[in-house]
C-alpha cells in the first residue's frame, strides 16, 4: 500500500479557505473544458459556494460546459424539503449559475430501490468520464461523503446507516433530532478515490482531531478520510483552527508539498 502525503495548505480564516478553494476551481474550469466536478454540502462549503457564485456573477467563470455529481443525499427526504442536499445545492449554487439542470446530479434519496439507484449513479459517473475535481468536507468522525468509520476502502455508491455523531452534527438542518434521517446514499470510498483530483477543505476547531487523524493517523477504516493518502493528487486546505492538532503543522499560508 503506497502512501502519498497530501499537499496541505493552512490559511488564516474560513473565508481565506473559501477564497483559495474557489481559486483552485476557477483554474480547473478555465483549463479543462468540459469539466466534471464532484460537489459536497455542509456548513464548511457555504462560504465557498458564496464566493463561487460571486465569481460566476462577475463573469470570471461559466458553468455552461460543466457537469457535477454530488457526494451524497439523505434517504427518504424529498428533494424540495428543508434539510435535503438537493435543497442545499439549489440554494447555494445551482439556481445562481448557468450549469444545465440535467448535468447537476445528486443521488436520488427517494428512489424506490436505493441499491439500483446507487448502481445507476456509479454508471452515470463512469459515462461522464469520471470526476475531474472532487470537493470534500470532513465529518468530526473522519467521514467523507457519508462514508462513516468502518466503510470499506473498496466501497462504491451505496446506502449507509448514519452514525449517531453525524445525526447530532447535522440536527440543525431539521426541526428536531428525531427528524434527522437515519440513512443516506453516498459515493463510496473507491468512487471518491477514482476522482482525478481531490480538494478537502476543513474549518473550525471541531475538525482539528479529524484532520490530524486523516493526515497523520494510521491509514484504515477507523478514519475514512485517511484513505485519501492512497490517492496521490489531494490538496487539503484548512484554516488555522482546523490545523491545530497536526504534529507536523505547516505555517499559515505555507504549503507542505508531497
Ligand atoms: C456532511 C456531509 C459531508 C460533509 C460533512 C461535514 O454531513 N455528508 O459531505 O463534508 O458532513 O459537514 P460540515 O461542513 O457541515 O461540518
Image: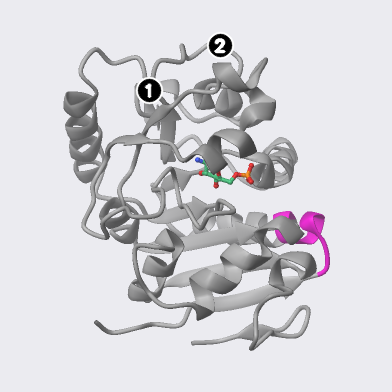
**Residue 210 visible:** yes
* Residue 50: x %, y % from top left: 73, 39
Q: In the rendering, which numbered label is found on residue 139?
A: none
Place residue 146 in its image quadrant: top left
Q: Is 15 included in the stretch rendered in magenta?
A: yes
Which sits in the foreground, 127 or 195? 195
Q: Mark 2 and mark 1: span between their CA atoms?
A: 20 Å
* Residue 115: x %, y % from top left: 19, 28
How would you classify the magenta stretch by its main secondary structure?
A: helix
Q: Residue at x 40, y 63 (%)?
A: 222
Disc number lying in front (2 or 1): 2
Q: In the rendering, which numbered label is found on residue 81?
A: 2
Place residue 73 in its image quadrant: top left
Of the two numbered discs 2 and 1 on the same chain, state the one appearing first in sequence: 2
Q: In the rendering, which numbered label is found on residue 102?
A: 1
Q: Which residues are magenta?
A: 12-18
Q: Secondary structure at mark 1?
A: helix
Q: Is residue 3 above or below residue 240?
A: below
Q: Secondary structure at mark 2?
A: loop
* Residue 93: x %, y % from top left: 61, 31
Q: Residue at x 76, y 85 (%)?
A: 251
**Residue 96 visible:** no
Q: Residue at x 67, y 15 (%)?
A: 175
Indicate if the residue with disc 2 has its beta carbon within 8 Å of ligand 1: no
Q: Is 222 included in the stretch rendered in magenta?
A: no
Indicate if the residue with disc 1 has its beta carbon within 8 Å of ligand 1: no
| Position of the N terminus by quadrant | bottom left
Q: Residues within 10 Å of mark 1 (few under 14, many from 20)?
A: few
* Residue 79: x %, y % from top left: 48, 14
Q: Is residue 131 above or below residue 100?
A: below
Amino acid at each position: 500500500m503506497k502512501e502519498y502525503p497530501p499537499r496541505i495548505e493552512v490559511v488564516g480564516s474560513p473565508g481565506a479557505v473559501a477564497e483559495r478553494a474557489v481559486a483552485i476551481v476557477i483554474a480547473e474550469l478555465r483549463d479543462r473544458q468540459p469539466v466534471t466536478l464532484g460537489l459536497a454540502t455542509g456548513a464548511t462549503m457555504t462560504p465557498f459556494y458564496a464566493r463561487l457564485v460571486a465569481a460566476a456573477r462577475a463573469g470570471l467563470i461559466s458553468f455552461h460546459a460543466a457537469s457535477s455529481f454530488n457526494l451524497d443525499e439523505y434517504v427518504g427526504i424529498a428533494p424540495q424539503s428543508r434539510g435535503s442536499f438537493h435543497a442545499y445545492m439549489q440554494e447555494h449554487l445551482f439556481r445562481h449559475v448557468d450549469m444545465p439542470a440535467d448535468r447537476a446530479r445528486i443521488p436520488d434519496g427517494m428512489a424506490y430501490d436505493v441499491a439500483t439507484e446507487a448502481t445507476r449513479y456509479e454508471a452515470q459517473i463512469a459515462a461522464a468520464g469520471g470526476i475531474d475535481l472532487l470537493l470534500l468536507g470532513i465529518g468530526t468522525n473522519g467521514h467523507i461523503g457519508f462514508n462513516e468509520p468502518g466503510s470499506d476502502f473498496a466501497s462504491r455508491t451505496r446506502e449507509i446507516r448514519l452514525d449517531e455523531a453525524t445525526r447530532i452534527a447535522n440536527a440543525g438542518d431539521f426541526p428536531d433530532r428525531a427528524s434527522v434521517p437515519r440513512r443516506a446514499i453516498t459515493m463510496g470510498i473507491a468512487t471518491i478515490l477514482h476522482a482525478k483530483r481531490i480538494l478537502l477543505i476543513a474549518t473550525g476547531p471541531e475538525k482539528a482531531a479529524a484532520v490530524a487523524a486523516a493526515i497523520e493517523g494510521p491509514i484504515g477504516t477507523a478514519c475514512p478520510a485517511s484513505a485519501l493518502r492512497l490517492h496521490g493528487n489531494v490538496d487539503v486546505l484548512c484554516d488555522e483552527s482546523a490545523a491545530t492538532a497536526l504534529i507536523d503543522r505547516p505555517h499559515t499560508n505555507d504549503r507542505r508539498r508531497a
